[in-house]
Image (tube, grey):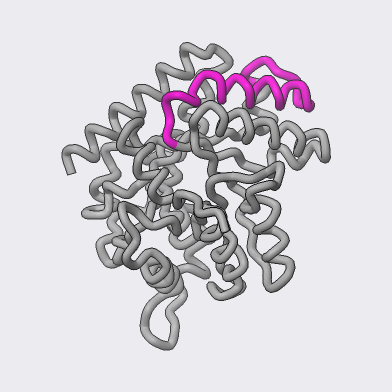
Amino acid sequence: MTSYEPFGARLRRAMDERGPLCVGIDPHASLLAEWGLADDVAGLERFSRTVVEALSERVALFKPQSAFFERFGSRGVAVLERTVEEARAAGALVLMDAKRGDIGSTMAAYAEAFLRKDSPLFSDALTVSPYLGYGSLSPAIALARESGAGLFVLALTSNPEGGEVQHAVRADGRNVGATMLGHLAAENAGEAPLGSFGAVVGATLGDLSSYDLDINGPLLAPGVGAQGATPADLPRVFGAAIRNVVPNVSRGVLRHGPDAGALRASADRFSEQIRAAVGAA
């Protein structure tokens, strides 16, 4: 069996070389309009290609949101396939933001769509939902290990509704979000320089010192930029785990398009601010 370099090792190298910034590729209708593009497949492709061409040599990770492509049907999915291929060919890592979660053979099929090496949508990592039970993710975990890919598991999300589930307390006294972090720490035990199984933890959540964020894996931190969090907030939120934080910025960078130079300048500003915050922590 072919052995592939694990996602965690590849991500650690990209973060060290390029900084940890993750930029979303979120071509929703209002953003296409801001760019002067039609809300159609041609606008979708122009938007995505512009982002990739402008930023692929600057960011550690791209995070395309699959829903914004899927809404155009098969032609939109074809654009997503090309976006993933072009981003990876240019040297960036790709995290598919699809938030898949199911059981048994269905979960296995979702995993094959995004984590099987010969799939047209193969991505370096995939966001997944564990709320049918962490064990339901087993097919995705197994295929990620086989393919050298990674997962980002929803643990402590920034949306207010998330607390309804994630803050619920189990019989053992731990809440659900902490339980997910514990599972991920177990997946990543002994991995170096970084495990491949990360958590999604919102940058807008404030003090998380009551949680053990040291999962030896990456922490995807949405919420920087348009949602209100700043790079300077990251040390307070993530504490000692900040070196493994991957801050995600979408609208904060994308609103500067379609000018490629403006996109690059915005991404560079965020990268510099993040590096300063991590260095000061």
Question: Going by the picture, which residue comes out furthest to the bottom?
Answer: 171
Any part of residue 167 in sight? no
Residue 114 in percent (x, y) is at 65, 50
Was residue 59 drawn as part of the magenta stretch in this picture?
A: yes
Q: Residue at x 29, y 27 (%)?
A: 272
Q: Which residue is drawn at 50% across and 54% down?
A: 3
Query: In the picture shown, does residue 151 fall above or below 122?
Result: below
Query: Between residues 275 and 118, which one lies in front from this camera angle?
Result: 118
Question: Going by the picture, which residue comes out furthest to the front?
Answer: 1
Q: In this view, does 69 lie to the left or right of 117?
A: right
Residue 271 in percent (x, y) is at 34, 29
Q: Is residue 70 left or right of residue 65?
A: right
Query: In the picture shown, does residue 63 fall above or below 210?
Result: above
Query: In the picture shown, does residue 176 fall above or below 194?
Result: below
Was residue 203 drawn as part of the magenta stretch in this picture?
A: no
Residue 138 in percent (x, y) is at 58, 70
- How many numbered callouts? 0
Q: Pick the quarter of the image with the N terminus.
A: bottom right
Q: Residue at x 29, y 44 (%)?
A: 234
Query: Between residues 112 and 78, which one lies in front from this camera angle?
Result: 112
Q: Which residue is drawn at 34% across and 60% down?
A: 191
Q: Pick the quarter of the image with the C terminus.
A: top left
Q: Quadrant of residue 223?
A: top left
Any part of residue 105 in sight? yes
Query: Between residues 174 and 149, which one lies in front from this camera angle?
Result: 149
Residue 118 in percent (x, y) is at 68, 47
Range of magenta residues: 34-60
Q: Quadrant of residue 276?
A: top left
Q: Is residue 9 left or right of residue 35?
A: left
